[in-house]
Image: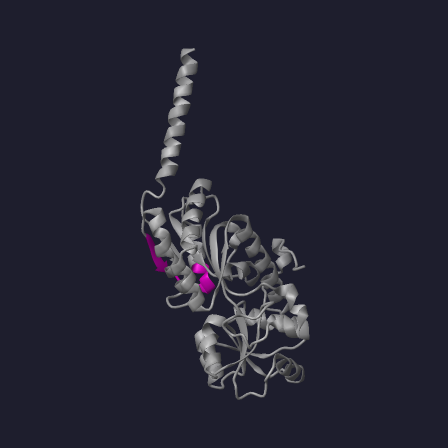
Amino acid sequence: MKKFKALSLSLFIVMCMATAVLAAYPEKNIQGIIQWGAGGGCDGVSRAITPLAEKYLGKTIILQNKTGATGAVATTMVANMPADGYTLLYAAENPATYRVLGLSPLSFNDFEPIIIPVEGAVVICVNPETPYKTMKDLVEAAKKNSKIKMGTSGTGGLPYVAGAMMKNLHNIQFNMIQFDGDGPGATAVMGGHAEVMPLALSTSVEYIKGGRLRGLAVLRTERVPQLPDVPAITEIYPEYKQYLPWGPFYGVFVKKGTPKDVVAKLTEAFTKAYNEARFTEFVANSGGFKMGLTGQKAADFTKKFESTASWLIYNAGGAKKSPKDFNIPQPK
């Protein structure tokens, strides 16, 4: 009986200690690693939602921009840290394509989603001086001329993948001209150095409204309120639906293996932050759309995105490895 009481007491003490540890999280400040530079979409969303989440966690999240290798530098850094919830990865969609591009062996499978609060949209933009008044004008011209200059941000970037969609569905290709991101690309198109470029809505919306760019189509199944006169791509070509939803997104992740209670606490804090009016206003003003995906829904979303993007890049000839090598299923 004495041994039983002693064992019961020991178990009780262990349980109390474990409960105290979990209840105490976070006991110290948290570091947040942003995989893209200051001023971009990922950085903007990260810095908008984090101060709101901090007050629910009771600790400061110290944000740092760690750029390089299409975000793989930051992704690798977080993957090499302990799975304890004290290092957060603020990521865009890029880890979904690392494996087929040979940039990193990591993917979203190596992380646990806390929340994916925002998605963006991609607009097919052209210089207003070009003869392309509609998406069909551009497609028909590209069928006759493969030298039309399309701006991209490099293999695997959003403009590249959008171009791959067009290549797969219309059997067309463009003369790809690489720029250092959406901003320089938009400037190049407006300056006539490229004729067309798929651009993030947040980058292009004011230029389109101001007449400096012409929006031909939005890569969505419905029009966006920011550009009500620009048709959704499926209005023109219904076959694009197989690839949608697709576009930029921004999320908060932790290393796989982080204790479930810690994940739950982080998810609760960031979900409350997501629901605040201040964050809703930020999203509306930045040209994004609220998602609020957590848990399995967030994981399923990243898997579908990986499937679509990886196979598009592979079929367009831009991949170093086949999606089959990683058991990435083809889009249905």
Question: Which colouring convention does the figure follow?
Answer: one colour
- Tally of numbered discs: 0
Q: In this rendering, is residue 192 above or below 176? A: below
Extent of the magenta region? 61-73
**Quadrant where the image shows the N terminus:** top left
| Residue that extends furthest to the top in the rendered view of this protein | 1
Q: Is residue 72 magenta?
A: yes
* Location of residue 263 by image quarter: top left
Q: Position of residue 286 (x, y in %)?
A: 43, 68
In which quadrant of the rendered view does residue 217 lie? bottom right
Q: Residue 191 or 273: which is nearer the viewer?
A: 273
Q: Residue at (55%, 87%) from the top-left corner?
A: 130
Identify the residue at image location x=47%, y=64%. Answer: 70
Query: Where residue 31 sits in the image (x, y, percent)?
Result: 35, 52
Residue at 35% over, 47% down: 57
- Say which quadrant the C terminus sits in: bottom right
Q: Is residue 26 left or right of residue 192?
A: left
Image location of residue 310, percent across then percent down: 59, 62
Q: Is residue 35 visible to the viewer in this orientation of the structure?
A: no
Q: Position of residue 275 (x, y in %)?
A: 43, 55
Residue nearer the viewer, 31 or 106: 31
Toward which corner of the image does residue 32 lie, by quadrant? bottom left
Query: In the image shown, does 160 or 248 lie closer to the viewer?
Result: 248
Q: Is residue 277 above or below residue 209?
A: above
State yes or no: residue 239 in magenta. Answer: no
Question: Is residue 232 shown to the viewer in this render?
Answer: yes
